Amino acid sequence: MPDFKKRETAYKIRIGDLLIGTPIIEDVPIIEKPEGNGETFNTTAPKERFRFLELGDKKIVRVNIIANIVDKYSSEGDKKYGTLTIDDASGQIRAKFFGEDVLKYQELSQGDTILVIGVLRSYNQELYINPEIMKKVDTRYLLVRKLELEKGIKQIQAKPTQMIPGQKKDVREEIIEIIKAGNSEGVSTEDIILKIKTASPELINAEIVKLLEDGMIYEPRPGRVRYLG
């Protein structure tokens, strides 16, 4: 059977944290074939290759980032090339794409909030992202990701449920209904926050924490919750 290489984890991370990491670079060995004798030998080319970003105990190759587009560029002519500079309030980094991918992402504009999943690369001492997925998302995702990274769902201090004038049901009931309607994998906390438009992300997170503490829901895996009752 063929060997399948395990796909690297796409770390949810702040841009500012990426910028303080250490890029690990290696020389690229190439095989050259001298004329005449047909033998081959290895030589080290002057070209270098980015392996991973070292950050604490992590070796980061792929990332999952939510940020705002603050600048967009696309080249003219036969050689298609484009960049999006993105900012998540902790720092800025560029996503670079080439060829037909320029057309794929042309609908994205400055000011959009986007989700970027891609592979880290380094060129001329610049760390950048070679995107696999880039799509526009609700701006509220920025705050959701910030809460997720800085505090974590279980570190948020629970607050009492607040009713908003004209609201037919409280936040707790809405959360439970959404979770009950989920599948066996559970429902992501991001989806819950985006579906409830009548409460702040902080309040929704606090209610989720209370439901976990009360034993009404549980986490089958980090960031996802299921109804227990």
Image (cartoon, rainbow, N blue to C red):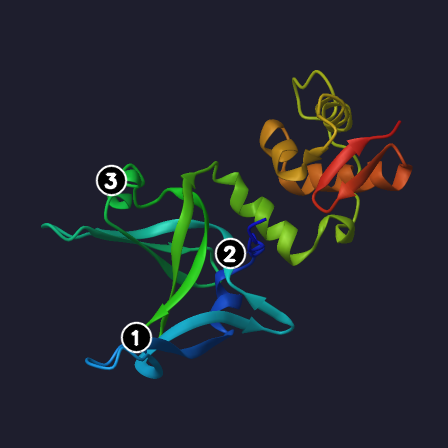
What residue is shown at x 63% (from left), y 55% (from top)?
149
168 vs 6: above or below: above
Q: Amino acid at mark 1?
A: Asn
Of 74 and 88, nearer the camera is 74
For mark 1, does the 10 Å Cα neighbourhood hold few (<14), some (14 to 19), or many (20 or more) residues? few
Mark 2 lies on a secondary structure that is: strand
Mark 3 lies on a secondary structure that is: helix
Instruction: Tell me, yes or no, if residue 3 can be seen here.
Output: yes
Decide which of tag 1 and tag 3 comes sooner along the chain: 3
Decide which of tag 2 and tag 1 comes sooner along the chain: 2
Percent of width and height locating residue 74 = 20, 50
For mark 2, does the 10 Å Cα neighbourhood hold few (<14), some (14 to 19), or many (20 or more) residues? many
Residue with the most extreme left position: 77
Residue 63 is tagged as: 2
Percent of width and height locating residue 211 = 83, 36
Q: Quadrant of residue 55?
A: bottom right
Of 80 and 18, nearer the camera is 80
Residue under label 3, please give it.
103
Residue under label 1, please give it.
124
Quadrant housing the C terminus? top right
Instruction: Tell me, yes or no, if residue 197 can be seen here.
Output: no
What residue is shown at x 32% (from left), y 79% (from top)?
40
